[in-house]
Image (spheres, helix red, strand yellow):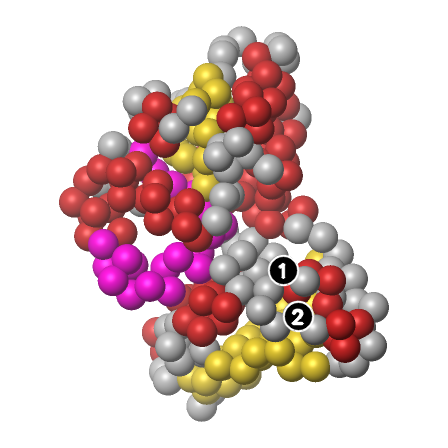
C-alpha cells in the first residue's frame, strides 16, 4: 500500500479530527510528519499526540510555514483561515505539496484563484476543496456544465456566532434579521471565517460574483443551516444541510483524503 506524507497548517479543533482519524486507522495511506499553527503550542500539542502513539513514525511541530515546507509533505491540510491559506498556497504548490483546504473563501479573490491554478498546473500539484458543512458539489458542477442556472445560498445562524462581526447588534438576540444580502465576494469580505461554504458553492456553480447569498440571524438558533438552491431550464436541485457544530467540516477533510487514494472515487 502506497504511503503519503501529510502535514497540517492550522492546529485547532478541526485538525484534531484529522488526527483522530489517523489514530483510528481511517487514513492508513498517510503519515502525519509535520504541524504548524500561529500558536506554536497548538502545533506542538498535535505533534505530541502522534509522537506518543504507536504510529511508528515521528511528527515535527514547526515554528513557520517555511519550516513546514522543508519537510516536503505530499499533502498539506489547511484548516486555519482564508488569510492563512493565501500565505501558504503558492509556496506549498511550488514546493511540490498538494493542498486540502477548508479556507475556500480565499479563492473568491479572482486574481489569487488564477495564481493558484497557474502555480498548481506548472508544478504538477493540486488543491482539493473539502466540502466542509455542505454537499452537492457534483450536482452543481454538472448543472453548470449543462446550461445556465441561477444559484442561491441561504444561511441561518445564531446571533452569538456573529458577535465579533460588524453586523452584530444586541437586538439580534430577540429579533430575526437578514444581516447580509449580496454575492459570495461581499459575504466572505464581511465574514472571513463564517461563509467559506458560500464561496465553495459559488466556485462549483455560477461563480462568486453571480451566486445570490443571504445570511440570516435567528434568535436562539444553534449551529448553522445552509440551503443551496439551483434552478435551470431542466434542473431544480436543493441541498440543505444543518450542522449543530463544525465537526462535519473536519470529517469532510478526512473524507477528501480518503477519496484521494481510493480506487473507487465518489
- Looking at this view, is 23 or 36 the one in front? 36
> Mark 1 highlights which residue?
164
Quadrant of the rendered image containing residue 225: bottom right
Question: How many marks are shown on the rendered structure?
Answer: 2
**228 versus 43 height, above or below:** below
Q: In the image, is residue 21 above or below residue 117?
A: above
Tags 1 and 2 touching, CB below 8 Å: yes
Q: Is residue 137 magenta?
A: no
Q: Which residues are magenta?
A: 97-115
Q: Secondary structure at mark 1?
A: loop
Indicate the quadrant containing the N terminus: top left, top right, bottom left or bottom right. top left
Which residue lies most toward the left here? 122
> With respect to residue 106, does 61 lie above or below?
above
Q: Decide which of 196, 186 is in the foreground and name it.
A: 186
Q: Nearer the viewer, residue 44 or 14?
A: 44
Q: Secondary structure at mark 2?
A: loop
Give x and y (percent) for residue 190: 50, 68
Find residue 239 and name its label. none
* Disc 2 target residue: 168
- In the rendering, at what x and y percent does residue 51 appear? 57, 12
Amino acid at each position: 500500500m502506497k504511503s503519503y506524507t501529510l502535514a497540517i497548517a492550522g492546529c485547532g479543533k478541526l485538525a484534531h479530527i484529522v488526527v483522530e482519524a489517523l489514530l483510528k486507522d481511517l487514513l492508513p495511506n498517510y503519515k502525519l510528519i509535520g504541524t504548524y499553527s500561529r500558536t506554536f503550542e497548538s502545533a506542538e500539542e498535535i505533534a505530541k499526540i502522534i509522537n506518543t502513539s504507536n504510529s511508528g513514525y515521528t511528527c515535527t511541530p514547526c515554528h513557520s510555514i517555511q519550516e513546514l515546507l522543508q519537510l516536503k509533505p505530499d499533502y498539506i491540510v489547511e484548516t486555519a483561515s482564508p488569510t492563512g491559506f493565501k500565505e501558504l498556497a503558492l509556496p506549498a504548490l511550488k514546493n511540490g505539496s498538494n493542498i486540502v483546504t477548508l479556507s475556500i473563501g480565499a479563492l473568491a479573490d479572482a486574481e489569487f484563484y488564477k495564481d493558484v491554478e497557474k502555480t498548481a498546473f506548472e508544478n504538477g500539484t493540486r488543491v482539493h476543496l473539502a466540502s466542509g458543512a455542505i454537499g452537492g458539489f457534483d450536482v452543481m458542477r454538472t448543472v453548470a456544465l449543462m446550461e445556465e442556472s441561477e444559484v442561491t445560498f441561504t444561511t441561518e445562524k445564531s446571533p452569538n456566532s456573529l458577535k465579533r462581526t460588524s453586523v452584530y447588534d444586541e437586538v439580534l438576540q430577540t429579533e430575526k434579521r437578514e444581516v447580509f444580502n449580496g454575492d459570495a465576494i461581499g459575504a466572505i469580505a464581511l465574514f472571513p471565517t463564517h461563509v467559506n461554504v458560500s464561496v465553495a458553492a459559488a466556485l462549483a456553480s455560477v461563480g462568486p460574483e453571480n451566486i445570490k447569498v443571504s445570511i440570516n440571524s435567528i434568535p436562539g438558533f444553534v449551529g448553522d443551516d445552509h440551503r443551496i438552491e439551483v434552478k435551470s431550464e431542466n434542473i431544480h436541485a436543493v441541498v440543505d444541510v444543518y450542522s449543530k457544530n463544525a465537526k462535519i467540516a473536519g470529517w469532510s477533510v478526512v473524507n477528501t483524503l480518503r477519496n484521494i487514494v481510493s480506487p473507487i472515487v465518489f
